Amino acid sequence: MQNVNQGNKAGARAAQDFVPIKEIRDGVAVLKGGGLRLVLIVSSINFALKSEGEQTALLLQYQNFLNSLDFHIQIFVESRKLDIRPYLETLEDLEKDQLNDLLKVQTREYIEFIKSFTESTNIMSKTFFVVVPYDPPIFSQRTGLLRRLFPGSPHGEASRTKAGEESGVGDNFDEHKTQLEQRAGVVEQGLARIGLRVAPLGTQELVELFFKIFNPGEIAAPSLG
């Protein structure tokens, strides 16, 4: 029995180590390696409904936006089966309050139609995110120099600890966050020129997003106001 428990604990530790996030602080995901990530939720455009000229203009604007960046970004698209239950509950409440018998019957028929349609067809909702990174510099040169000058001394360990603190989660967090927000501002301005709305996710929204990634179907996705 002891071996089984030890195996379960080892498995739990391995699963936790798989998640690269150390903490979520002030709307910023701090990675175990010291990097910072800010997640933007972005609206969408129905590209197919645009004219050929509008499509060409959008593509050129998007190309110019990508070429203007001097840092990399990650575009993440979340596809989920649309949860129609809140809409059905609203219709059922309207049916109960309906005084006209004919409208009451029509509302019930519409509810049944929506139920049967959604059960036979997978209606997907898509949410678009842009991940903006910032990796603070780690001053490893000083650590290496001290190790060469004082082999086996505590100064090397102290420098390594200081370097870890300066990687984004120590006293310089606000400074690094400012750098990250400046990058996010560049992304927001570039996407706004294409006609897209952008908003950063807060701490709670980030927690919900990552929870959904590892536990699909549990929490509704955050949305733009």
Image (cartoon, helix red, strand yellow):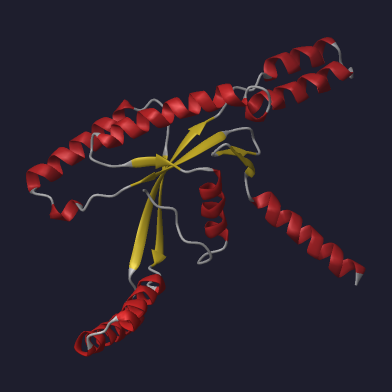
Coordinates of residue 206 in the picture (x, y in percent): 53, 47
Relative depth, front residue between 3 and 22: 22
Identified at 19% across, 35% down, the residue is 60
The part of the image, by quadrant, that contains residue 157 is top right
Q: Residue at x 26, y 86 (%)?
A: 104
Q: Residue at x 8, y 47 (%)?
A: 52
Q: Quadrant of residue 86?
A: bottom left
Please, which residue is most extreme toward the top here? 149
Q: Position of residue 129 (x, y in %)?
A: 40, 47
Q: Nearer the viewer, residue 11 or 98?
A: 98
Location of residue 152 in the rendering, given as x and y in whole percent from the top left corner: 89, 19
Q: Quadrant of the N terminus?
A: bottom right
Residue 139 at x, y = what percent?
Answer: 66, 18
Q: Residue furthest front?
A: 99
Which residue is at a point 49% across and 37% down the rendered structure image? 38
Q: Residue furthest right?
A: 2
Does residue 120 appear in this view? no
**Position of 7 relative to 184 (above/below):** below
The answer to whether residue 155 shows anywhere in this view is: yes
Residue 71 is left or right of residue 211, and the answer is left
Residue 180 lies left or right of residue 79; in this view the side is right
Vertical comparison of 123 with 177: above or below:
below
Left or right? Give the position of 141 relative to 113: right
The vertical placement of 127 against 178, above or below, is below
Q: Is residue 21 left or right of residue 39?
A: right
Q: Quadrant of residue 55?
A: top left
